Image (spheres, helix red, strand yellow):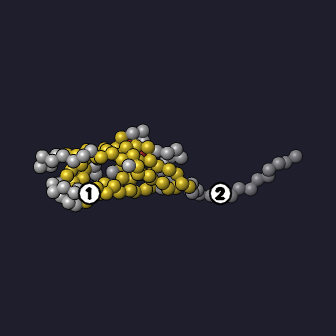
Amino acid sequence: NTIEFAGALHATIVKQVHLKNPSSNTLAYSAILLGRDADDFSLPKGNTVTIPATRQACVTVEFTIRFLHPAEAVLILISNKVDGIDGATLTFSLKSEVKNIEPVAMMKCKSPCYEL
């Protein structure tokens, strides 16, 4: 699965990964960000998530677009044993795309283009 972070240059984009636990046991995961641009992505709500039996939980991923080139990383959710039960390891590809560039400020200048 790929999660796309598209927006304006310097914009901060927040995405949530919704996780469902269909089993009758509690699941716990540790989140890790890996890859070339992993330092540009963050997990503002922490890198652990616990999903009670037959419930849902979210992992929040935040990214600020700092460069024009696309950023890439991988989000890996590794299961921690709870009550002797392991969940599947989950991976998500994280990619960014600059959709537009908005100026921070504008200046007006007047000068002659050519003088003899």
From the image, tell me which residue sits under label 1: 20
Asked if residue 7 can be seen in this view, the reply is: yes
For residue 5, side relative to residue 78 (left or right): right
Query: For the point 40% across and 57% down, which residue is it?
Result: 14
Residue 34 in the image, given as x and y percentages of width and height: 36, 40
From the image, tell me which residue sits under label 2: 107
For residue 40, side relative to residue 58 (left or right): right
For residue 64, side relative to residue 55 (left or right): right
Q: How many marks?
A: 2
Q: Are marks 1 and 2 in contact (CB under 8 Å)?
A: no
Q: Is residue 94 above or below residue 53?
A: above
Residue 19 in the image, given as x and y percentages of width and height: 28, 55
Query: For the point 36% across and 47% down, which residue is it?
Result: 92
Query: For the point 18% across and 58% down, which residue is it?
Result: 53
Q: Extreme top residue here?
A: 36
Q: Please state which of residues 74 and 114 is positioned toward the viewer in this rendering.
A: 74
- Point out the tag, 1 or 2, that comes first from the N-terminus: 1
Secondary element under disc 2, as helix, strand or loop, is loop
Q: Extreme right residue here?
A: 116
Q: Quadrant of residue 106?
A: bottom right
Residue 83 in the image, given as x and y percentages of width and height: 11, 49
Disc 1 residue type? Answer: Lys
Q: Residues within 10 Å of mark 1 (few under 14, many from 20)?
A: some
Residue 31 in the image, given as x and y percentages of width and height: 29, 47
Q: Please state which of residues 18 and 102 is positioned toward the viewer in this rendering.
A: 18
Query: For the point 28% across and 51% down, which residue is it?
Result: 46
